[in-house]
Amino acid sequence: MVIYFSATGNSKYIAKRIANALDDEIICINDKIKNNDTTPIEADKRLVIVTPTYAWRIPKIVRDWIKKTEFKGNKNTWFVMSCGGEIGNAQKYNKLLCNEKGFNYMGTAQILMPENYIALFGTPEKDKARQIVSNAQPYIEKTIKTIGENKAFAPNKNSIYYSALSGIVNDMFYPLFVKAKAFSVNDKCISCKKCVNLCPLNNIKLVDKKPVWGSNCTHCMACISYCPCQAIEYGKNSVGKTRYTFESLKIE
């Protein structure tokens, strides 16, 4: 079984590639989290968890959902993390999560994909993004091969720097940066509710036909990235930046 969380499509693409190659069932965690669905999950062959990297670890909302959900069947568990740069020492925390859940930890793979965190960083133009995805293909194929052979991923390189990124920096990142108050909407908004429907934490509501953000945000960037009119901004940080979604690359 392949389960995935994806906001702008990178992890979804990787998860589908793995599931199709290994003829595995695939489940979207976004829908589970949005509907507060912790129905038990049963993996017949294996469990592959595909997520983006949030501050050098898997997203907290994914971690919390996994903790609340009962998993049955095969406990061999691989983590595959898409990232715009590095995953730091995410493997340490994935292994701890496996220990807590009784999973057999089979390692963590890193797949470099186009940056989507428009709240802090620049996002690539389409040609550059397509090249990044092209460069990722050998790593995706290697990941599929390793999982298919029921082998563990090689351990990721670690350092004091990576440990700090996934440890103290991650702990500080959420309270200091992961806030929704900087989101705003302009007159381009057509009240389509796409942002409302995509938000995995149900943190956006339409008030007087305009989206309003609450305080429960995970900075997935789905709302700003998929807005069909580019009516959403994140303070001044997103002004003039390309909105990235994997689907816009039109890669099969």
Image: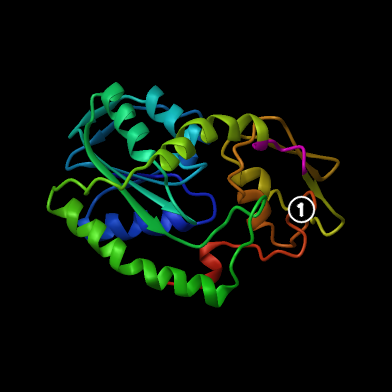
Query: Would you identify the image quadrant in which residue 203 lies?
Result: top right
Which quarter of the rendering shows the C terminus?
A: bottom left
Q: Furthest residue to the bottom?
A: 127
Residue 43 image point, x, y percent:
23, 37
Q: What stretch is highlighted in magenta?
A: 177-182
For this rendering, which residue is in front, 55 or 50?
A: 55
**Residue to which mark 1 is pinned:** 233
Q: Is residue 195 rendered magenta in the image?
A: no
Image side of residue 217 versus residue 97, left or right? right
Q: Is residue 178 rendered magenta in the image?
A: yes
Image side of residue 208 versus residue 225, left or right? right
For this rendering, which residue is in front, 51 or 160?
A: 160
**Residue at 51%, 30% in the rendered image:** 168
Residue 11 image point, x, y percent:
43, 53
Most common SS among magenta residues: loop
**Residue at 40%, 73% in the rendered image:** 134
For this rendering, which residue is in front, 80 or 74?
A: 80
Image side of residue 191 versus residue 195, left or right? right
Above-or-below relation of 207 to 70: below
Can residue 177 be seen in this snapshot? Answer: yes
Residue 142 image point, x, y percent:
23, 61
- Secondary element under disc 1, as helix, strand or loop, is strand
